[in-house]
Amino acid sequence: MGPRHATHTRQASCRAEGKLKEGYEMRAFELYDANSIKEAIDLLRANAAKNARVVAGGSDLVGGLMKDWVHGKGLALPEVLVDITTIKELVGINEDNGGLTIGAATTLSDVIDHKTVSSKFSLLSNAALSVASPLIRNFGTIGGNINQRPRCWFFRGEDFNCYKKGGDFCYAVTGDNRYHAIIGGELCYIVHPSDTATALMALNASAKIDGVNGSKTVSFDEYFTGPRVDVLRENILKPGEFMTHITIPNPPGGVKFGW
Ligand SMILES: Cc1cc2nc3c(=O)[nH]c(=O)nc-3n(C[C@H](O)[C@H](O)[C@H](O)COP(=O)(O)OP(=O)(O)OC[C@H]3O[C@@H](n4cnc5c(N)ncnc54)[C@H](O)[C@@H]3O)c2cc1C
Ligand code: SF4
């Protein structure tokens, strides 16, 4: 299967209008639609040398990190993206007697609009409702929200080669460190940016992971990792792995939520 397209249209139109400065173009990339989990894994494996990554709505990966050239020695820009929103089994919400299973490529709007989520798991629907704007919630997915990269302004700024990009300094220690962590930091002081992750952790959710190393299910407690484990990432996912589903057990009777 060939890539869907290999260059970014804005780049082409800006170049035509003479608005792009040399070195500020968005890097071209190949985009593949995966039709199954297996196909996504095969694509990630085949394109590992090109730093292949899964993409869902693309609001953070394409619209943020790649557009703004957020990269460094420990953070290479991907040359290949594998779209997982084209995998049917990753989209949608299923209920059974034990609770809910949410496909990682389900949009935040679909999570918010789901009757059982809002009646039984209102913590999650309120958390999802607090994310960004209706436009972003309409195409941003729950998996992308949980796995988005940190919002630290030094990390997002191209002139700051900090620890999280493989550099040798944390600019937040001496710089503007509003909205950073007070406890649990070491080398890096980010706070995790995902609203839904906080709610899912409180709901005792688990993440199903698939990838080049096989599949496994881990609790959200074990999914996220701090900078002491590896400053270059925020969770246990290794290259070639991605989240396929989130499962949430029924809350015990009498539980009340507040967001
Ligand atoms: C203006 C703005 C305001 C925002 N405000 C908030 C806010 O208030 N609260 C909040 O929580 N978020 C906020 N966000 C972040 C937003 O929620 C995320 O951009 C969005 O949810 C990401 O979803 P996506 O599907 O577009 O992810 P993508 O951009 O496609 O992916 C994001 C990252 O996750 C990875 N990824 C995607 N899916 C998976 C998966 N299934 N398994 C493993 N990795 C995966 C990608 O490789 C990428 O690194 C904001 C974003 C913007 C642009
Ligand atoms: S807090 Fe983390 S992401 Fe921000 S500058 Fe320091 S090392 Fe980089």
Image (cartoon, grey):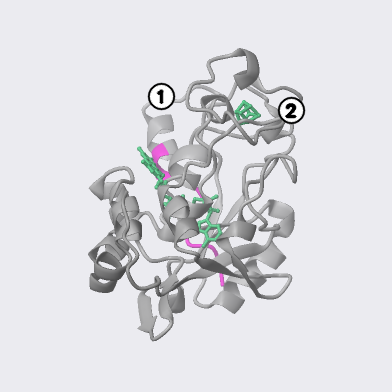
Segment tinted magenta in the rendering: 1-10
Please tell me which residue lies in front, 14 or 233. Answer: 233
Place of residue 59 in the rendered image (x, y in percent of width and height, measured from the top left): 41, 47
Where is residue 255, by image quadrant?
bottom left
User: Callout 2: helix, strand or loop?
Assistant: loop
Examine the residues drawn in magenta and state their main secondary structure: loop
Is ligand 2 closer than 8 angstroms to the Cβ of mark 2? yes
Quarter containing the N terminus:
bottom right
In this rendering, position of residue 123 left or right of residue 184 = left
Q: Is residue 71 above or below residue 47?
A: above
Q: Residue at x 74, y 55 (%)?
A: 49
Which of these two is toward me, 40 or 118?
118
Amino acid at the residue labelled 2: Gly
Instruction: Say whether residue 141 is magenta.
Output: no
CA separation in Å, label 1 and label 2? 33 Å
Give the residue at x 58% y 14%: 175
Q: Residue 254 falls in which quadrant of the image?
A: bottom left
**Which mark's residue is nearer the viewer, 1 or 2?**
2
Q: Under tag 1, what secondary structure? A: loop
Q: Which residue is mark 2?
A: 167
Give the numbered dot on residue 55. Answer: none
Task: Give the left or right position of residue 159, taking residue 104 as reference.
Answer: right
Residue 195 drawn at (x, y percent): 41, 48
Q: Looking at the picture, does residue 54 appear above or below residue 102? A: above
- Does residue 94 appear anywhere in the picture? yes
Mark before the other along the chain sequence, 1 or 2 = 1
Residue 18 numbered tag: 1
Q: Does the residue tagged 1 have its C-beta within 8 Å of any atom of ligand 1?
A: no
Give yes or no for residue 5 being in the magenta stretch.
Answer: yes
Q: Looking at the picture, how far across and down is residue 92, in whole percent?
A: 36, 74
Residue at x 64%, y 36% (from the top left corner): 184
